[in-house]
Image (tube, rainbow, N blue to C red):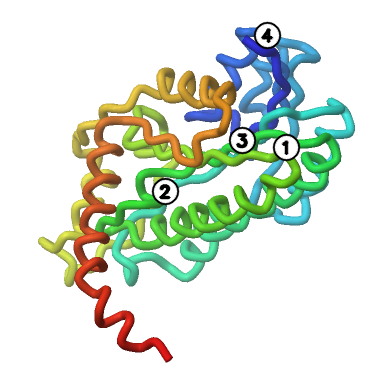
Amino acid sequence: MTTRTWFITGVNSGFGRQLAEQLLARGDRVAGTVRREGSADDLRDAHGDRFRLAHLDVTDLPRIREVVDAAFADLGRIDVVVVNAGYGLFGAAEEVSDEQVLHQITTNLLGSIQTARAALPHLRAQGGGRLISISSVAGIAAHAGASLYHASKWGVEGFFEALSQEVAPFGGEVTLVEPGGARTAFAGSSLRTGEPLAAYDGTPAAFVRGFREGAPIPIVGDPVKIAARVIESAEQRPAPLRLVLGSDSYRAVTASLRARLAQVVPQEASAAGTDA
């Protein structure tokens, strides 16, 4: 096991918290960020100078670069940057407000992009490193009632896949983590929903109302095991571009990809028909 230094956004709860706890327990150094001040002070108190804590709301885009630059300046080398901070916005597209749309895209997509962009000069200067984006099965497979969440995660997928090709010449590697449902605050206190419209009663988009109403939703993912697999992936060479975690994620991802191929493959001849 190699001891590493990690930068992780959103270490107050969910996967970020699990990652920080497991990494610190094994002796690694962690620079973590939290949106709510005081929400990870226990980790700082327990681990001293092996845990560096900074306040960051990733919707404050200029602040992201300040925090990342300061972490690299204080710690010297950072081996793994984990872009984790985010949340889910559920509801049909016209049920969510303009403000909710903007906040979802800014948090999940623009915050992820700017965190990676802030780290890139440092990773190049040190001769490489790993970028890990906590994406989602929702970045590959789509479901009615989560269109804005999908928009943010599909954007993350495209950005980091292209970025993996950009950083390769400098020794950089990228992994997109595709977890399914997990027993975190994602479907609880972190979840945001739109205001239900009667027009969507009984339609596919209405399934997400169960989250809002507290209906029991079967969730198979263990966040402790998921975090452990993410940590293990940092040892893999070459880095896995996508890390699918959870049987539900595997089923949804493979079904989505097969469906896309089934739609596209029959169009080979008609696609060629528009060539010059």
Q: Secondary structure at mark 2?
A: loop
Choose mark 3 or mark 2, whichever is in front: 3
Q: Secondary structure at mark 4?
A: loop
Q: Residue at x 32, y 27 (%)?
A: 221
Instruction: Measuring from the top left, give residue 92's x and y in whole percent.
Output: 29, 64
Q: Secondary structure at mark 3?
A: strand
Choose mark 1 or mark 3, whichever is in front: 3
The amino acid type of the residue labelled 2 equals Gly
- Tag of residue 55: 1
Instruction: Measuring from the top left, give residue 218's x and y in whole percent.
Output: 20, 32
- Tag of residue 82: 3
- Tag of residue 27: 4
42 and 58: which is toward the camera: 58
Q: Is residue 20 above or below residue 96?
A: above
Choose mark 4 or mark 1, whichever is in front: 4
Q: Quadrant of the C terminus?
A: bottom left
Instruction: Measuring from the top left, give residue 143's x and y in whole percent.
Output: 26, 56
Q: Quadrant of the N terminus?
A: top right
Alpha carbon distance from label 2 to label 1: 21 Å
Alpha carbon distance from label 1 to label 3: 16 Å
